[in-house]
Amino acid sequence: MSETQPMVFVIDDDQSVRDALDSLFRSVALNVRTFGSAQEFLAAERSDAPACLVLDIRLPGQSGLDFQNELAASGIDLPVIFITGHGDIPMSARAFKAGAIEFLTKPFRDQELLDAVMAGIERDRARRAEISNTHELRKCFASLTPREREVMARIADGWPNKKVAADLKLSEVTVKVHRGQVMRKMRAKSLADLVRMADKLRVVPTEKS
Amino acid sequence: MKRQPFFRAIRAATPVLPIATAALALGIFLADSITDLEIAVDVLYVAVVLMSASFCQRRGVIVVSAGCMALTVLSYFITPPGIEDTGLINDGLGLVAIAATTYLVLRMKSAESAMHLARAQLAHVSRVTTLGELTASIAHEVNQPLAAIVTNGNACMRWLARKPPNLAEATQALERIVKNGERASRVIERIRGLAKKSRPQDERLDINDVVREIVGLTETEIQQSQVRLRTALADGLPAVRGDRVQLQQVLLNLILNAIESVTSMSRRAREIVISTAKDKAGNVRVSVRDSGSGLEANALDRLFDAFYTTKPNGMGMGLAISRSIVEAHGGQIEASPNRPYGAVVQFTLPIDRAAQGHGRKSSRGWHGEFPRYESKKRSAIAGSGDPRQRPPANAAKASDGVP
């Protein structure tokens, strides 16, 4: 199942460094793919698996730091570990600010790199879980009727049933029925659970005139 | 008979001048001997000494001067008798004049060679300074293989630590270690070659190799400045003769100038093109063109002057030294505007053993302190007939008599 196997991407313009990293990652049973340039990486088809990117700061035609920004801008949210021949403090500061996991100076200690890669993969895995979680929630939310959504927004905001009923011009009993439906469809175990979901989905009560 | 050492001392240049000088000396000797004793024709030997200075080394000048003095004395004895006192005084004055002229010529010669030496040292200093500008490149060039070595070493250990150990992968990692070690040592060798202070070599060179090597060394610099460097190297170029390191210094200067020029422009494509070709005159031409800020018209004339610089921190020696080197190789260097923008600096080099007319121009340049190098070139120029027809063994012989 290579779909779920974590993956390490390496972008370095130097063939010999690429070969070395390839061997190192394979020796610890990590899947690895290497690229000579940012363009090659972007052009390649990437499997849907937790991954992290080992990126040389100096890339042909473009700095790795710029590429990091470009990736973030185009919605590819991969954890990045920078490797560089000569790192200076402003460079590493910029990298960390843009969310880099680690900034290693060549030649680096293999354990440091592997630790960083593991941390990166872990972060990506968590992010992916988070995304699929939100995805799941959205699906539940989509199954609500418009009325149920209105009710959910209000009770999640802490309104008592009576106020919800008044606002939506419904009877209190009807609100209670809707409320039960919302809890069931959203698979919320408690009101607190529902509040957290509403928060994640950014569901807020809209003004009723 | 007396002239024998004189001829040995001259450096086989154009034979016209030594022959004219000898003829003049003979003429003066005859005039001095035929005319009356008191007529001081011998003072004219001063001209012979001065002429000899243009094609003789120090020793040659001394020999010529001694010869002239000997002729003066000889004339004194064979001239028809006249007024003894005046004759003696005039001859004495003639001898003093010859001696004084010789002294001055020798002083001039030593000043010249001091200048050549100073230039050579300056070239070395400038090369080392230029290399200093490449520190980042050089560090990167050495660091890459080192990083690969360390990583491969670690990978190798991990392959071996597996149960069971993966010997095939471990061996491959070791092979890569060896390869990268060799790569690092080649880089160091190249840098050492450039930083070394050595006498100029005179070897057969493929100009494309020279270009490729220096491009390899500046690669990182180029990448870091986000410049695109293209090479358009012509196939089947004839070999040139010269000093690899010096020619690389010229290229290095031109490339660094080009990088500086293109990086000063923010909006344009940053491009440098190095091309080699054979020109109409049969020379090899190397051009470095950039899409940078270009050259101002009034800068063009002074570009190759020493201490002329358009950069705030420049020393103004790079192009001056480049010109010296190119001219010492019998070539020419020139700068012109590139279209649509930027500049192109190109230099020509005569192909191996070809007699090029402008080779002689180099007398203003470099080779004062490189007698071996120059003498070979000069003898090729001086040779009668088409030197291309001459077998190499003969060419080597022509330079044998050089001190």
Image: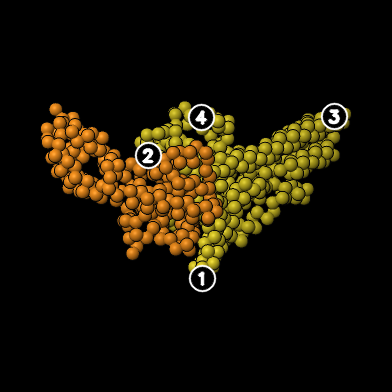
Chain colours: A orange, B yellow
Please, which chain is the residue tagged with disc 3 on?
B
Q: Secondary structure at mark 1?
A: loop
Nearer the observer: mark 1 or 3; the answer is 1
Residue A145 badge: none
Nearer the observer: mark 4 or 3; the answer is 4
Residue that numbered label 1 is attached to:
B163
Nearer the observer: mark 1 or 4; the answer is 1
Residue drawn at x 22%, y 46% is: A183
Residue B310 badge: 4
Is residue A21 left or right of B109 when viewed as pictured?
A: left
The x and y percentages for residue B114 are 70, 37
Residue B269 badge: 2
Q: Residues within 10 Å of mark 1 (few under 14, many from 20)?
A: few
Badge 1 or badge 3: first in the primary sequence: 3
Is residue A149 left or right of B246 when viewed as pictured?
A: left
Q: What is the distance, in whole Å, between disc 1 and disc 3 at their CAs? A: 107 Å
Q: Residues within 10 Å of mark 2 (few under 14, many from 20)?
A: some
Residue that numbered label 3 is attached to:
B89
Q: Residues within 10 Å of mark 4 (few under 14, many from 20)?
A: few
Badge 2 or badge 4: first in the primary sequence: 2
Q: Are marks 4 and 3 in contact (CB under 8 Å)?
A: no
Q: Are tags 2 and 1 found on a single chain?
A: yes
Q: Are marks 2 and 3 in contact (CB under 8 Å)?
A: no
Q: Amino acid at mark 4?
A: Thr
The x and y percentages for residue B26 are 72, 42
**Residue A107 versus residue A196: which sits nearer the camera?**
A196
Answer above or below: position of A174 versus A56: above
